[in-house]
Amino acid sequence: MPDEWRHGRGQEFSSRLRGDRIHEVSSSSPSTPPSTASSRAPAKIILSGEQFVVLGAPAVAMAVNLYSKIEVRPSQSGRIEVTADIPLHLVDDDSKRSTASENQELLEPLRLAASATLDHLATGDRSVHVDANCQIPIGAGLGSSASTTVATISAVAKSRRARLDREEIFKLAFIPENYLHGQPSGVDQATCIYGGVIQFKKPSKIKAISVKRPPTILVCDSGAHRSTKGLVESVVKKSQEQTDRFQKHLNEITAISNDVMKALQNEDRNQLGSLMDRNHELLRQIGVSTPALDRLVAEARKAGALGAKLTGAGGGGCIIAVCDDSHARSNIARKLRKAGGTVYNVSLDLGGVD
């Protein structure tokens, strides 16, 4: 895997997505009808950066072994159909009570992903059924939307006998991600596409971080989920109103992300934990943490975590904790469950979208 990939800026988007980099593309003639195809993509956690990446700071992110799985099959409907199997325990209570129209809105990014891919492939046949199965908590800061989006793009391309390179998938994923999040940085889809541990900086600088022994990480879901779009808009507005304060935060988070990268490469769990603690404090200061998240972070530290922080946009969702070893992780997990959290013992995913 190369150390660094650089993707084109927004003004290059349309010209780079005309099919000049598509591999093994078949025609949509009757001799090569669409086939059934599948793909999967991992979840992600943010080790440092979070909301600050939207403002230009680097983030360090890690793909983890929770997955969304997409199956695409031919349809006779003449249109793009989307269905999803999402276990209820992965959805918060408000979403369980949502109306049919609101549920349909949750599926709209997958329809947009399929539509953008078919447009990119210049296929006339738009009859396709997309079926999603997601193991990733929804709206919890683990990249469920990015994971399902990039897996959909990959599966739709496969169903048309095409295989897109990762750069193409990254660019196409902005269409549904823009719909859902308003101003996505790109870090979520980059992590889900490439896998492993990456450093990401807007607009599209992605650097693979070689980690010989990944840290022992625990994810704890608070059960309170939220909209990334509203939180991002709020932080951007605050940064425009408090420029000096946010510039200091950006400078510090940039240093933290660079030090996180070094701690990972040096296998320094204690340093990683300290950096995560400071990162959480900065996120708390800009108002994206919650009492529930702060309580879980405190419980994790009290139970022996080397460091803990919220992951993702905040406002609810998950925390992550770095643990000394698997035994320590078990003890911390037990305490967090008693505190009302849902715990996931995750490990590094190296493959990204397949």
Image (cartoon, grey):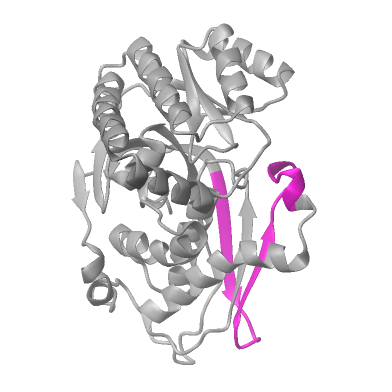
**Boundaries of the magenta span:** 67-95
- x and y, in percent, of residue 271 in the image: 33, 13
Q: Single out the residue that lies furthest toward the bottom.
A: 30
Residue 91 magenta-drawn? yes
All told, the count of numbered labels is: 0
Residue 120 magenta-drawn? no
Q: Quadrant of residue 262?
A: top left
- x and y, in percent, of residue 88 in the image: 76, 47
Does 121 appear above or below 92? below
Q: Quadrant of the N terminus?
A: top left
- x and y, in percent, of residue 234 in the image: 47, 47
Left or right: 19 in relation to 71: left
Q: Single out the residue that lies furthest toward the right.
A: 97
Left or right: 249 in relation to 114: left
The residue that appears at 57% across and 22% down in the rendered structure is: 294
Does 36 appear above or below 321? below
Does 338 appear above or below 232? above
- x and y, in percent, of residue 64 in the image: 48, 36
The residue that appears at 76% across and 66% down in the rendered structure is: 100
The residue that appears at 39% across and 25% down in the rendered structure is: 279
Between 195 and 111, which is closer to the camera in this rendering? Answer: 111
Q: In which quarter of the image is residue 59?
A: top left
Between 273 and 16, which is closer to the camera in this rendering? Answer: 273
Between 70 and 190, which is closer to the camera in this rendering? Answer: 190
Left or right: 342 in relation to 173: right
Q: Single out the residue that lies furthest toward the front.
A: 241
Query: Is residue 344 in sight in this rendering?
Result: no
The residue that appears at 63% across and 18% down in the rendered structure is: 333
Query: Is residue 250 in sight in this rendering?
Result: yes
Q: Quadrant of the C terminus?
A: bottom left
Does 14 appear above or below 267? below
